[in-house]
Amino acid sequence: MSTDNNIPPSAKPLLPYIRSRQEVHRIRQTLTLYLQSHIVSACDDEVTTPANTNDTSHVSLGVPIDPSASVKRVPSNLTGVRKEYLKALQENAAARREYDELSNRIAFRRPPAQDNLTSTKGHDTPPLHDYLSSIREDRRYEKLRLFDNSLKRLTGATKPDGYVADEEQQNTLLDQEKLESFWNGLGSSRESNEGVQALISKLERTVLRAKAKLAREQNLLKELKARQLSEDVSNNPSRRVIALQCVRDELVQWVEEKLVTANSGEAAEFGESPKKNTASSQAVEERKGEIREQYAKYLQERRLLLEALSLVSQPTKSTTPAAERCPKGPSEPVVTNTAVWNSIDLFGPASELLLPGSTVQRSLALQRSYLTGLLSKEKTNLKQALERLSHESHLLPEYPILARHSKFKHISNNAGGRTDRTEGDQTDELLQKAQAWAFASEAASTHEGDYVEQRIEHGLDMSESASRTLQQVYGLLNQENNAAAEDTALDEGNETDIWVGEVESHRPRRRRQKNDQQPGNPWARLNGNVGFSEG
């Protein structure tokens, strides 16, 4: 009760779950003993049944257990942390066993030198270790002997003709002699005090050196074979001809490519002979001389023309004063010293007249280019619209222009002069599409009109047949079709004269009244002589 009194009021709802330290320690000991009961080891009594159960604590579960220990099958009623603990112990035991097996294998495969080092550290060597090590050395020696025999067969193969031994080959032979001496002394060295590990390292170095020499010999053999093949090719005339043809084809192709890219004049000069080149160069020089002479004459005549135009268009300016001027005889020409005019002054009056015209022409050119661009844009838009409509419409496939069809081209070519005139001209694509649309729409309207006329004719035929059938029915029933008679009379009267038709329109009413008074019984015609002819 004292413990209950010491509990604060806020913890009283947790009272069923609160335990004292002694009780908690007892529960932990019980759980520890229960978990240790599932652990089996070489000394099972020490784990499961300790000498003093009171000293058993849950802390002992965290201590590493013996590697030889194993865990029993985990009961199905265990859950939570206890089940996870036993599974972890099982995995730990399996991992330790696997580790021990691997370590034993590695220790078993160690060379004798390492085994001696490990033995000095305090580990006891197994009794069959020496025997097994000797067996391994015998196997290794047999493998090396086989490798040496195969190496001798490779190096002792027949050498090709023309093979000249060089320094590398001599070194290879020396190495082979050293290797043979090494193998001869290997049996005696195995009995000596020299370590096996040193011999193995020497052997490995020798093997590596022999592999390098073998690779070098193989490279030399390949080079010799390549030389022999090249010599065979050089001695074979057919192969030489084929090679020369390939080279010629490559050169011709290269020259053609260069000729395409070069100028026409340079290409012509490239293909001509030296004599033709000299003749063409002389002709070119003569032509250049003629052109220079003509150009000099042109410049002189142009200068004279400009001077004449300047004298005519502008007043002359004399450098002498007016007082010094004196009239001379008529036979003597008048010498006037005119100032030199610049050629730009000639275009002074012309530029004043040409500038407005140039501005007008520029504006017209801009307007023309703008209109051309606008028309091309509208033409492109219209073309796209017609293409889209041609893909979506059903009129063009149903009503194509027969003259453009491949089956009717021979007919359109023989149709007349108009097709002959336009045969070679390529009409505009836009115009062709517009013509196709116009033809399709016209054909569709014509087809629809024909269909309507056919249906009207069919309706008239049906109405006439219905009227005939109705007249037959009236005849069978001994009645008259007064409505039809009146309609026909009215129609005929209206067609002849409209005034007479109005007067005569009252007469059918009287007739209708008389007919109404007459019996309209269908049996009125029957007089008793059914089936008998009169008289």
Image (cartoon, rainbow, N blue to C red):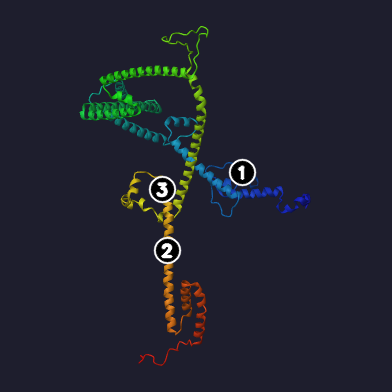
Number of residues whose C-alpha sits closer than 10 Å to that of mark 2, classed few (under 14), some (14–19) or many (20 or more): few
Q: Secondary structure at mark 2?
A: helix
Number of residues whose C-alpha sits closer than 10 Å to that of mark 3, classed few (under 14), some (14–19) or many (20 or more): few
Mark 3 or mark 1, which has the lower sequence index?
Answer: 1
**At which x and y percent is residue 255?**
31, 27
Q: Which mark is residue 60?
A: 1
Q: Is residue 205 left or right of residue 103?
A: left
Closer to viewer: mark 2 or mark 1: 2
Q: Which mark is residue 451?
A: 2
**At which x and y percent is residue 220?**
30, 25
Q: Nearer the viewer, residue 239 or 372?
A: 372
Residue 12 in view of the camera: yes
Q: Which mark is residue 432?
A: 3
Amino acid type at mark 3: Gln
Vertical placement of residue 46 versus 515, above or below: above
Image quarter where the C terminus lies is: bottom left
At x 43%, y 61%, the residue is 449
Q: CA distance from mark 3 to mark 2?
A: 28 Å
Q: Which mark is residue 87?
A: none
Q: CA distance from mark 3 to mark 1?
A: 104 Å
Q: Nearer the viewer, residue 294 or 345?
A: 345
Amino acid type at mark 1: Ser
Q: Residue furthest top?
A: 324
Q: Is residue 415 left or right of residue 328?
A: left
Q: Secondary structure at mark 3?
A: helix
**At which x and y percent is residue 139?**
35, 34
Mark 3 or mark 2, which has the lower sequence index?
Answer: 3
**At which x and y percent is residue 52?**
63, 46
Based on the displayed image, in which of its 4 quarters is residue 454 positioned?
bottom left
Mark 2 or mark 1, which has the lower sequence index?
Answer: 1
Q: CA distance from mark 2 to mark 1?
A: 110 Å
Q: Is residue 201 left or right of residue 66?
A: left
